[in-house]
Amino acid sequence: MTAQIIDGIALSKHLRSEVATRAQALITKGVTPGLAVVLVGDNPASQVYVRNKVKACEDSGLYSVLEKYEVSMTEADLLARVEALNHDPAIHGILVQLPLPAHIDAQKVIEAISPAKDVDGFHIASAGALMTGMPGFWPCTPYGCMKMLESIGYNLKGKHAVVIGRSNIVGKPMALMLLQKDATVTVCHSHTQDLKAITLQADVIVAAVGKRNVLTADMVKPGAVVLDVGMNRNEEGKLCGDVDFEGVKQVASHITPVPGGVGPMTITMLLVNTLEAAERASN
Ligand code: NAP
């Protein structure tokens, strides 16, 4: 079997055109969806991420502003900036790019964002909403994974989904979203014993670890769907995921590539959340 590739670029293009259409409808009502992206310091990877996010907004007709601050910015000043954005009617979504410099308490800053503008979905209120099935913003990366499963018409009901990784931004919310769709979910982490025995039982595997080749072909049940969230570099410095793509694609029914898989979907779901925030604010 050679797996069908779930193309995150093509799916993103489709979803972003829907975002652009919905944004246009809001704009004609006098509301331009707006995202504020806040970057503190000069982390090179973060600079690339924020540029991509701002460009994606502009390409879909959303307003976006990038606020860049020196690494020496104090926590109090950042909290004051977030508070001002909470009250800015032109801004519907606020994203503070992580990681923040060590002298700033990132959790405190995230909790300062109004839940109504928490388009990253990292606020404790958003986590609580996801946990209880209430309306709120879902973290963009696992939300993108759900959209990828939806795009292939995959019915999760009664299926065994295995999530490798339990971070607050990917693994845990991923597990909750899968559970909400009636999958039976197993969450694995660095203390899991015999990962292979667990993944071999899975109908769906989401790898969100940050280590190359965490999932190899011998660990995958024939026909399983494999989503690769990982972002790593190989010996040649090329971007790669957590999954041995070449091997696993011989066994899985569907697989996401890296690059071109979950990555673009993460930014797309940020646009979706920002649009949603603007629609909610305008109602
Ligand atoms: P993280 O906070 O470092 O969490 C990694 C998780 O993997 C932890 O729960 C850890 O377990 C677990 N783990 C580590 N070694 C393991 C092993 N050998 N077997 C099983 N589990 C193991 O990372 P993250 O923020 O969730 O991100 C995960 C990966 O996704 C990274 O490569 C990141 O760059 C990537 N990512 C990609 C996107 C995207 O848009 N494509 C977005 C976000 C993240 P413990 O909890 O026990 O330590």
Image (spheres, helix red, strand yellow):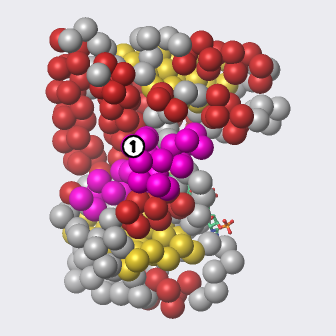
Q: Which residue shows up at 55% across the image and 27% down it?
A: 114
Q: Which residues are magenta?
A: 122-150
Q: Is residue 110 left or right of residue 20?
A: right
**Three-letter residue code for mark 1:** Pro
Residue situated in front as seen by the camera: 195 or 283 = 283
Q: Quadrant of ligand 1?
A: bottom right
Queried on whether the Cβ of the residue with tag 1 lies below 8 angstroms from ligand 1, the answer reads no
- Mark 1 highlights which residue? 135
Location of residue 183 (image quadrant): bottom left
Residue situated in front as seen by the camera: 86 or 169 = 86
Extreme-top residue of the structure: 30
Position of residue 257 measured from the top left corner of the image (x, y, whole percent): 35, 60
Count how many numbered circles sit on residues in the image: 1
Location of residue 46 (image quadrant): top right
Position of residue 148 measured from the top left corner of the image (x, y, whole percent): 29, 57
Q: Which residue shows up at 19% across the image and 33% down it?
A: 17
Q: Is residue 48 visible?
A: no
